[in-house]
Image (spheres, coloured by chain):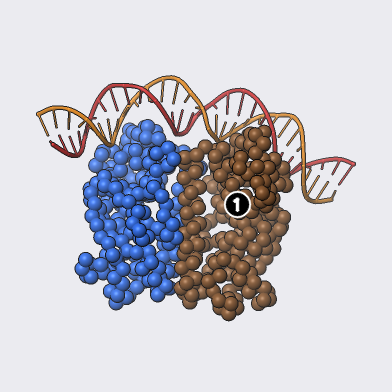
Chain colours: A blue, B brown, C red, D orange
Amino acid sequence: MYEELKYWYLRDHKLFRVLSFSQIKQLCIIVGFKKAAKGEIIYFSDSDVPRIFLLKRGAIKIVSVDADGNEIIREIIQKGDLFGELELDSQKSANEYAKVLSDEVSICSFLMSDFEDLLLRHPQLALTYTKFVGLKMKRIRNNYTNLVSKDAKSRLRQFLLDWIEKEGKIEGDSATLENYLTQNDIAQIICTSRQTAVQLLNELESDGILSYSRREIHFPKLSLL
Amino acid sequence: MYEELKYWYLRDHKLFRVLSFSQIKQLCIIVGFKKAAKGEIIYFSDSDVPRIFLLKRGAIKIVSVDADGNEIIREIIQKGDLFGELELDSQKSANEYAKVLSDEVSICSFLMSDFEDLLLRHPQLALTYTKFVGLKMKRIRNNYTNLVSKDAKSRLRQFLLDWIEKEGKIEGDSATLENYLTQNDIAQIICTSRQTAVQLLNELESDGILSYSRREIHFPKLSLL
DNA sequence: ACCGAACTGTCAGCTAGCCGACATTTCTGT
DNA sequence: ACAGAAATGTCGGCTAGCTGACAGTTCGGT
């Protein structure tokens, strides 16, 4: 992989903004790079050394298999997100893997040990990283609260709002999402059954709040959501 | 506050173990210290500067008030735990406060800015702290998973096991917990109603798994849980 | 020793949402 | 172009657990 490319991959991630131009150039911690197509499964926990991944393009879901063999969605990773053992504790969670959702993804990775060294050499980066992880924690905790105190419909609305905020193409008061999730995925994310999710989506549709298709979801009036 | 005391307060926290004897002595970042009795409410978010707190003795719960005015338990903080704006993002969560659960608590605090400086000067500490926050995130995520996939009874069992692991006096195959929680608290922690929690506790009691009283919970045979 | 407040215990009715079963539509590979 | 697979829709029965209502118990303060 060209040094030049590595540079850019790190450069435009907000985590590394605290580093100077030349510092980034010296990094060279990226060791892996791969592409994968829709539906492919990536076992990132079975590589012998712990890694941290950076999703450059597309979207994937992290799923784990419970005792009964059901897939449960742990997390949706989107363009620009870091994933893997962010906790830096190298203890691999068994039977967890990633599944590609969008048509194509690009992922690059670096070794956790390299990353740790980097944090040690750049305390400011370590601080930023901690805040980064903290933010993630906050988001998880928010979901948790929603799950407890809101019903399925509110959770769906909230999820859609979050999604729009992250990836929506907004034009005035309307917005469009490229829909790489199945209704089953959506159901799992908002922690409900597929049947309930379908029903809720259709309710929103007949209320004129959105129009749903396999390819995209359109919101004619954002303020309604 | 005596320097000597400050020293010891930090010294025996696992987070600061990476620092050398003399490094700790130089810290002096502790700026506040207070005691409080059962039932007292501590607003830690209204102090003008963001702080991080260390609970030296006792137990408290972090609660926040939702839109309808209900208290919801965010977190139980026990002896030795850090709390406050661990994410280091200084953005105060409105209407969140702490309530003392045990008979008495001792809390010391330091300024977030001091702590950040400290992390910058000691990269190794920053790394440890990051892992620390990461661990917390992992625990929250686990609860989340339990909430989704397990029923109330399993969640209660899991909670009791966790509690025993943290604070139980274990003797052979039996264990005892000092019970500073009301059944209402327990209910909220495992995300169910008080009535359901009562029922479940009584079920466990008539199964001979535990004996519950306001003061303590005793488990005659841990293996049953 | 007493009173009020907080906590604990129990019951019955109700409902959000799960689950299984099935029909229909859309996509994908050959 | 076609078959099979995957995704989407729809229905009705069922149940875990919520809610309200109330009674009994324990605790802390005066």
Report the side of C30 relative to B203 (left or right).
Answer: left
Taking A65 as reference, is A84 above or below it? below
What's the residue at 59%, 66% (across, down)? Answer: B13
Q: Nearer the viewer, residue A98 or D17?
A: A98
What's the residue at 24%, 46% (across, down)? Answer: A38
Q: Quadrant of the C terminus of chain B?
A: top right
| Residue A139: % across, % down | 44, 53
Quadrant of the rendered structure where residue A127 is? bottom left
Q: What residue sits right under mark 1 in the picture? A: B165
| Residue B194: % across, % down | 62, 38
Taking B1 as reference, is C30 above or below it? above
Identified by mark 1, the residue type is: Glu
Report the side of B81 relative to B120 (left or right).
Answer: right
Residue A153 visible from this viewpoint: no
Taking B120 as reference, is D8 above or below it? above
Q: Nearer the viewer, residue B205 or A13?
A: B205
For mark 1, give the secondary structure. helix
